[in-house]
Every structure is written in C-alpha cells, then in structure tokens.
Amino acid sequence: MLGGSSEMKTNRLLLVAAAVLGTVAPQRVRAQEPIFALDSATSPSPGHYILKHQFRWSSLSLENDPRDGRGDIEDYQFRTTLSRGITRDLSMSARFDLIARDRATPLSLDNRDTEQGIGDVTVLAKYRFYQDDSTGLNTRRLSAIGGMQFRSGDRPFTSDGYNPIVGLTYTQIAGRHGLNGAVSYLFTTNGVEDAVLAGQGDADLFRYDAAYLYRLSPEKYTVDTYGAFYGVLELNGYYETNGDHELLIAPGIMYEAAKWTAEIAVQLPLVQDIDHRARNEITVVAGIRFSF
C-alpha cells in the first residue's frame, strides 16, 4: 500500500508538471514575438495558425522637402498577418496593409490631400535550423527567412515591383527575460517615385531589429496562470542604399493569454539622417493576435 501510494503521488506530480509545461511553454515562446520587428524565431505548431491585426498611426514630416512645399503627413495602417505552421521547423506567413494617408499640400483647396489603398503584399517562409531547449521553459532558436514583396496595384502605396527579402531571426527565453534579434535585406526591383516610408523608394533596404521583453507578472507560472504581462523595449533600424538611415526606439506593453495576445507601443526617433523620404516623428501601435 505504501509503495502504491508513493507511486500514485509521483504520477500525479508528473501529470501536473506535464500540464504546466504543455500549456505554459508554448505560451511563453509565442509571447516573445516583438511588436514592431519584421519577424521572430517563433512559429505556430504544424497545422495551426496565428492571425495578427495591428492598427498603426504615424506622424511623419516632409518639412525639408522642397517639392511643392509639402509638409506633414499622417499615415493610418491596418495591418493583417496570417501565419501557418507547415512542419515543426517550417512556417509561412502573408501580410498586407490597408492604408489611408493624409498630407499637407498647397495643391488642395483645404491644404490637405487624402489617399487610400492597399500596400504591397509580403509573403515569407521561415525555417528554424537551430533550437536548444535547456529546460521546458527556456529556449534559444535561430531561423532563416526568405520571401517576396508583391505589388498591390494601388498607387502611391505599391512599389510596382517584385522585391525579394532574405534574413535571419533569433529568439531566446531565460526565465522572465526574452531577447529577440533580426536582420533582413530587401532587394528593390522597382519603387514608388514619392516614397514616404523606408523601403518604398528605389533603394534597397537593410533592416535590423532588437527587442527585450520582461515578464512583469506573474513572477512564476503555475497551472492556474491565465495570462501574463510583459514590458517590451525595441530598437528598429532602417538603412537604405541611398544613404537614408533611421533608428527608432519603441517601449510597449503586452498581455498574453492562452489563445490571444494584446499589445500597445509607441515608436520614437533616436537617429535620423534622411534626405529621400519622410521622417518618422511618432508611431503608435495597438494590436491583437489570435492562435488557433
């Protein structure tokens, strides 16, 4: 009887541990995806999806542009990204933006000009070629990404080209800390004449992203944990082969539950050396994503 009782307690502990690791570990990995970065090394499980919606408002400045005496721009984007797990290490994603842009111009009777349309569609494949899970909750992952940016046909938001993208992403989770890094290169085959955002003109774009996430609450996961709050701090860099360079900092907060995540962040300039497009004065993002 004593042996049986001890064995039952051991089995019960193993079941509890499996439940914690089975529900918490995937949740913590998904929560480490940054808000602004192009991508991370996390992926949905095979046959599963992540649907991400983001609303972005940006205030940009063209005050140094002598053409037509144009001034400030307000850019509104509703971004949708759908990712699907193909195998344990391979996933695919597709992203498109609905855009409304309001700019100051002396050519309009009310000194404002409003444009609406669909931005370029981006399709990416991601292959995780390195994974080291030191415990059930801590991990290091490295993935390669590659894909294409396709023209949408809606001027002035389309690049009017088919632009390849390649890159690397890294994700690490250690206790309450999460680190992300990503680099990517966009080969521009054709751009818009009147570029507003990085990567829209004729120049190639080298992008580099870094993010630190800290789990604010709870201090430790248990079987009763429903969700977690994360503080996020990102650096997002954009260097174009025409010499334009911009580095932005983005503090934010994220709440991650078992099947959904909500996020909000503000992006501000740190370094701006720009002559061929608008300068980003501030960007505010509110987003939600669902796992199914």
Image (spheres, rainbow, N blue to C red):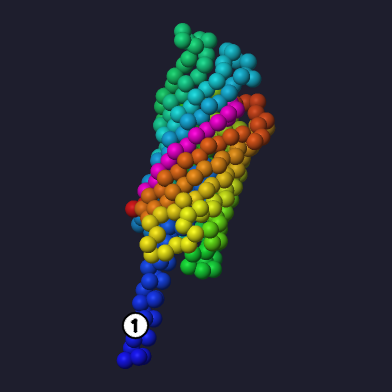
Q: What stretch is highlighted in magenta?
A: 278-290
User: What residue lies at 35% left-to-right and 91% top-to-bottom?
Assistant: 2
Which residue is denoted by mark 1 in the rendering?
Answer: 8
Residue 85, x across and y down, in percent: 40, 55
- Relative to 168, is 283 above or below? above
User: What residue lies at 38% left-to-right and 65% top-to-bottom?
Assistant: 223
Disc 1 element: helix
Residue 84, x across and y down, in percent: 39, 52
Q: Nearer the viewer, residue 36 or 9?
A: 9
Estimate how packed mark 1 is, as few (under 14), some (14 to 19) or many (20 or more) residues with alpha carbons within 10 Å.
few
Viewer can see residue 282: yes
- Relative to 59, is 39 above or below? below
Residue 149, x across and y down, in percent: 48, 39
Q: Which of 66 and 229 is in front in this view?
A: 229
Q: Which of 157 and 8 is in front in this view?
A: 8
Q: Furthest-left residue in view?
A: 1
User: What residue lies at 44% left-to-right and 49% top-to-bottom?
Assistant: 255
Residue 36, x across and y down, in percent: 52, 42
User: Is residue 213 in the magenta section?
Assistant: no
- Amino acid carrying label 1: it is Met
User: What residue lies at 60% left-to-right and 43% top-to-bottom?
Assistant: 235
